[in-house]
Amino acid sequence: MRMKSFAVLPLFVLALAGCASSSGSDEKDAASLNLTEPVVQLAQLSTVAEAARHVTGGIPIQYRVQVENPSSESITLERVSVQSIGAGAYTMPNTSRPFSVEVPPNGTKSVDFWANGVVDSDTVYGSNGPVSLRVTAFFNSTKGKFQHTAVEQVHYEPTVGH
């Protein structure tokens, strides 16, 4: 009898694994909706003062996301998520901000937002050095919802947005 319960255990584990892997994700890209993929760019607008360049801990960081819509359909930016990848001047935990910004056909719109990064090590550049971020922009259109993901290396550049 003990053998039968062990024989059922692998089937139970497989069933659970199947449920976990089939999350029913509706994540689409623009091409699957017959839309031209938007161009999404992320820039860092803020800097840490020179006197605090090598301080560790939390720092507020301002970003700008620019969306260029080469499509003939209007799209709406609904949410932006950013998260650091690998080592850099600071780490950015997965941070998400809601928006409701319509980007007209063949148009460009920008949104600014603040997020809290964490400086946890002393780097050559200090907290103003480069950081690789994964940015995911979530959109809605008359053809359906979709997302666009890109990786950007950011750091403060005085000419951006000023």
Image (cartoon, rainbow, N blue to C red):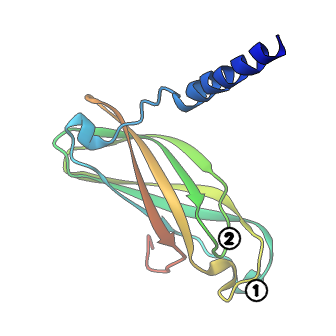
Q: Which residue is drawn at 61% across and 80% down?
A: 129
Q: Residue at x 20, y 51 (%)?
A: 70
Q: Residues within 10 Å of mark 2 (few under 14, many from 20)?
A: many
Q: What residue type is labelled 2?
A: Tyr
Q: Distance between the residues labelled 1 and 2?
A: 17 Å
Looking at the rendered structure, the number of numbered marks drawn on it comes to 2
Q: Which amino acid does label 1 sit on?
A: Ala
Q: Give whichever of discs 1 and 2 has the lower sequence position.
A: 1
Q: Which residue is drawn at 55% across and 54% down?
A: 82
Viewer-proximal residue, 141 or 111? 141
Look at the numbered disc 1 and give the secondary structure of its residue: helix
Which residue is denoted by mark 2 in the rendering?
A: 90
Which residue is denoted by mark 1 in the rendering?
A: 51
Find residue 126 and report its horizontal and vertical position in percent.
Answer: 69, 83
**Residue 50 located left or right of residue 69:** right
**Residue 34 located left or right of residue 96:** left
* Above or below, comparing residue 117 to residue 136 in the picture: below
Q: Residues within 10 Å of mark 1 (few under 14, many from 20)?
A: few
